[in-house]
Amino acid sequence: MKHLFSALLVATSALATQAATLQPAKSDVSFTFKQMGVPVDGTFKKFEAALDFDAKKPEAGKIAFTVDLGSVSLGDASFDAEMAKAPWFDTKRNGKATFVSSAIKPTGPGKYDVAGKLSIKGASRDVTVPITVAAGVASGSVVIKRLDFKIGDGEWTDTSMVANDVTVKFKLSFAGL
């Protein structure tokens, strides 16, 4: 579910004033949803970002972000295996979630709104991700609706069991900024 949230990582485009390189070991993409009212946290261990950004002209910037849905972790191997199945991420047919920016708008010193298209399991939605950039790190969070992306099909569409809102959080560290 978190990669859904990975779309959120898109925000990293605001970081690069030159060719910057994502440092995955210093970066984090996580998500939180509620199951029967109890918060459940997860992470994605594999993700990539391509940046083209000039802080003097943020509106001309671009970012592409990809999350490997098969790298999801809820902290338990049996739960992780369940997330790979068809009702959830269906990683055999839909192994990646992507975000491609369409606009970057400055909203304050070191703050940007990154608009773009988030695609998961064949469904695409426009999202805007607020990010903060400081000391080579882009961070932020965004709430997505899991059912908009067909995550939790069938019996899992009941939002009293698994909430529809998923908060995706990210901290992306870049070298070369």
Image: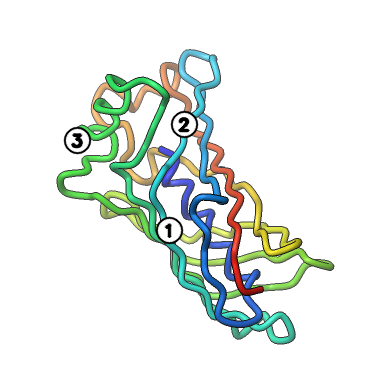
Label 1's element? strand
Residue at image point 46% right, 37% down: 43
Residue type, mark 2 in image? Gly
Residue at image point 44% right, 69% down: 64
Q: How crowded is mark 3: few (under 14 residues within 10 Å), some or many (20 or more)?
A: some
Q: Quadrant of the N terminus?
A: top left
Quadrant housing residue 168? top right
Left/right placement of residue 70 relative to residue 163 reads left
Q: Residue 42 carries which label?
A: 2
Which sits in the foreground, 98 or 43?
43
Q: x, y (%) of residue 121?
A: 27, 49
Residue type, mark 1 in image? Leu
Q: x, y (%) of residue 142?
A: 59, 47
Mark with earlier residue (3, 1): 3
Q: How crowded is mark 1: few (under 14 residues within 10 Å), some or many (20 or more)?
A: many
Could you tell me how far apart the alpha carbons at marks 3 and 2 are, in whole angstroms? Answer: 18 Å
Which sits in the foreground, 12 or 18?
18
Label 3's element? loop
Relative height, residue 146 to residue 123 (above, below): above
Q: x, y (%) of residue 137?
A: 67, 59
* Residue that label 3 marks: 86
Q: Which residue lies furthest to the right in this view?
A: 109
Q: Which mark is residue 118?
A: 1
Q: How crowded is mark 2: few (under 14 residues within 10 Å), some or many (20 or more)?
A: many
Left/right placement of residue 94 relative to residue 53 reads left
**Tag nearer the camera, 2 or 1:** 2
